[in-house]
C-alpha cells in the first residue's frame, strides 16, 4: 500500500485493516475488489513455558504485534473477548521477522501474527508452541486497491483487455 501511495506502484494487495488505517489517514485510494477471505490467516502463537493456555492468561505477559495491521486488530479483539485490554499486557510492537526472533529467544511470551509468519513461529518453537486461534474473532480479507489518480487516469486510456 505504501509503495502505491508513494507512486512506486499503480495497484496493491492489502488486508482490510490496512485499508481501515489508511482510510482514517485520509489517503486517496479505491478498493477495486476483495479477492479472498481467510478465517484462520491470523493467529496468536504463545510459549507454553510462559504458562499460557488461553488468551485470558495474557495478563502481564509480553505480547508482540505489528501496529496498525490485522495483527494489532486481532490481538485487541482477542483480548476484549477474553475480558482483557492492551493495558493488561506488556505490548511490544515490531515487524514479523523481529517479533518471531523475539518469541523464539524468549523475549516475548506470545505474538499475534499472520501467515506465513505465524506458521514459522509455531514451527520454530515446536513442542513449546501453542496456537490460540479462533475463526470467530477475525477473518482476514485481501483486497486489490488503486490510487484514485491511477484509477481516473486509466479510464482515459484503452483497456488492457
Image (cartoon, grey):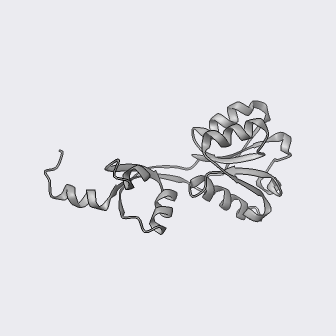
Residue 73 position within the rendered picture, expressed as x and y whole percent measured from the top left: 61, 59
Question: In the image shown, does 57 or 72 lie closer to the viewer?
Answer: 72
Quarter occupied by the C terminus: top left
Residue 1 visible (yes or no): no
**Is 2 rendered above or below residue 85?**
above
The residue at 60%/39% (across/down) is: 117
The residue at 60%/56% (across/down) is: 67
Residue 99 position within the rendered picture, expressed as x and y whole percent measured from the top left: 67, 43
The residue at 69%/58% (across/down) is: 78
Q: Specify the quadrant of the image occupied by residue 147.
A: bottom left
Question: In the image shown, does 118 or 68 lie closer to the viewer?
Answer: 68
Q: Specify the quadrant of the image occupied by residue 139.
A: bottom right
**Is 43 rendered above or below residue 120?**
below
Q: In the figure, is residue 144 to the left or right of 152?
A: right
Q: In the figure, is residue 40 to the left or right of 8?
A: right
Residue 17 position within the rendered picture, expressed as x and y whole percent measured from the top left: 52, 58
Amino acid at each position: 500500500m505504501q509503495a502505491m501511495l508513494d507512486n512506486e506502484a499503480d495497484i496493491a494487495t492489502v488486508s482490510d485493516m490496512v485499508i481501515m488505517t489508511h482510510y482514517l489517514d485520509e489517503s486517496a485510494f479505491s478498493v477495486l475488489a476483495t479477492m479472498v477471505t481467510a478465517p484462520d490467516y491470523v493467529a496468536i502463537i504463545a510459549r507454553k513455558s510462559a504458562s499460557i493456555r488461553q488468551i485470558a492468561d495474557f495478563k502481564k505477559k509480553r505480547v508482540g504485534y505489528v501496529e496498525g495491521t490485522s495483527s494489532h486488530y486481532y490481538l485487541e479483539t482477542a483480548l476484549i473477548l477474553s475480558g482483557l485490554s492492551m493495558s493488561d499486557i506488556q505490548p511490544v510492537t515490531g515487524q514479523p521477522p523481529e517479533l518471531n526472533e523475539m518469541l523464539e529467544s524468549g523475549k516475548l511470551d506470545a505474538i499475534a501474527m499472520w501467515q506465513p509468519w505465524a506458521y514459522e513461529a509455531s514451527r520454530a518453537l515446536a513442542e513449546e508452541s501453542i496456537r490460540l486461534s479462533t475463526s470467530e474473532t477475525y477473518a482476514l480479507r485481501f483486497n486489490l486497491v488503486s490510487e484514485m489518480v491511477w484509477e481516473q487516469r486509466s479510464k482515459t486510456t484503452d483497456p488492457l483487455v
